[in-house]
Amino acid sequence: IVILGGILPTTVPEFALKKTNADIAVKGEAELTIVKLLNSLASNPADLSRVPGIVYRDEDGQFIDTGPAEIEEDLNKILRPAYELFPMNRFVEQHFYPHDQGQRLADIVTSRGCPFNCNFCYCVSKPRYRKIGEVIEELIYLKKEYNINGVNFLDENFVLNKNRIQEFLDGVKTHNLDLKFTATARASVIDKEIVKMLYQAGCRAINIGLESGDQQMLDRMHKKTTVEQITQAIETARRGGLFVEYPCMVGNIGETEQSMRKTFALLKKLAWGDFQCRIPFFCTPFPGTEIYDYALEHSLISGIDDFYEKFTSFNDLSVNLSAMPNQDFITLFNELAEDLRKYYAEQLPSWKPSYKLKEY
């Protein structure tokens, strides 16, 4: 029996089962679902209808959807992963900038969900948080058992609350963890004080969603941030010694030549002290997002099969949501991307890595 989980089986379970010929798709977070599913398979495999949060085929080959998955409101009730069952050395020996080759990295989640509803995101759910004490205990365990010295926090938004970051910093100091970590943050909460706290706790890289250099586009995305906030957050984090990732996209609903030019202009403005050529990726209407529904309503795609026929990667235009014809959009993008590459190449000799810049 093959059971699927993840974003695809959650958003389009029947499609996932058809494409893979798997037996069962589990929707959403599965800690509660999987136990009931396995117990049901053991006791009465012919009838899975009482297991919430799954899709499966009945004896006639018809898909049965048992409704939404159960969500555990208290993340502290969920036990930490059974790390000993995995080839941990393969996982902790991953390396990515700005971590050094000698670091051993663990991936950790301290919260789930996000209080915002960006139109391109399929991970919208009520935010829930683990107790910082539980997180610290897990880090102590990983350091003792697997000799980790780096952490990649995978939360949608690790930095949302100043008090929580202070509590984390206190825990790191109390237990002398000495770990370097990467994290995610919203531009609207980044200031000098919180950057100093993050650096003291061991943060050396942070991901702040730029998304667009045009305010109208940010508003259409429901980002609830401003271009000024984003610019200030990135520069504040850099001046505090953090390496900053700031992914952005082009091609969301109503994108125009003017809005695209603003995004590329902002990338140039932010390029001081940096050394990565940050070409925007293409906005992609994945199933479960607001822009997927928009693409369906406006006949830009005919359905899920059509979308996945068109989609290859973020670096290719799959569905054009912009206000420009396809060829005009691609021509303009190529022109602006090439200009940005030349700008980086011309400026690169005088730049220094931003993570070494620390003013406070």
Image: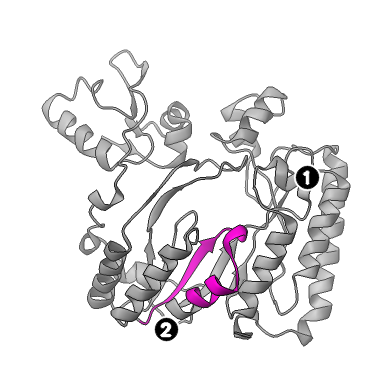
Which disc number belongs to residue 7? none
Query: Residue at 84% across / 79% down in the picture?
Result: 346
Please state the horizontal and vertical placement of residue 150, each as a whole percent of the image.
40, 75
Q: Which residue is mark 2?
A: 102
Name the foreground residue: 332 vs 22.
332
Which quadrant is home to the N terminus? top left
Compared with residue 311, is residue 184 higher up or lower down, i.e. above or below?
Answer: below
Q: Is residue 246 above or below residue 179?
A: above
- Which kind of residue does numbered mark 2 sit on? Gly
- Any magenta on residue 133? no
As for residue 187 lying within the magenta part, the answer is yes
In percent of the image, x 43 and y 35: which residue is there? 10
Report the front residue among 77 and 79: 77
Residue 89 vs residue 97: left or right? Answer: left
Q: Nearer the viewer, mark 2 or mark 1?
A: 1
Q: Quadrant of the C terminus?
A: bottom right
Q: Which residue is mark 1?
A: 216
Task: Give the secondary structure at mark 2.
Answer: loop
Q: Residue furthest top?
A: 60
In this view, the residue in front, 320 or 155, is: 155
- Residues at discs 2 and 1 in contact (Cβ within 8 Å): no
Disc 2 to disc 1, how far (Cα)? 44 Å
**Label 1: element kind:** helix
Magenta-drawn segment: 178-198
Query: Residue at left 75%, top 70%?
Result: 270
| Residue 155 appearing in the image | yes
Residue 230 in the image: state x and y as whole percent: 68, 61
| Vertical position of residue 57 compared to residue 250: above or below | above
The amino acid pointed to by label 1 is Gln
Looking at the image, residue 19 sits to the left or right of residue 175; the answer is right
At 88% from the left and 49% from the top, the residue drawn is: 258
Q: First in sequence, mark 2 or 1: give its number.
A: 2
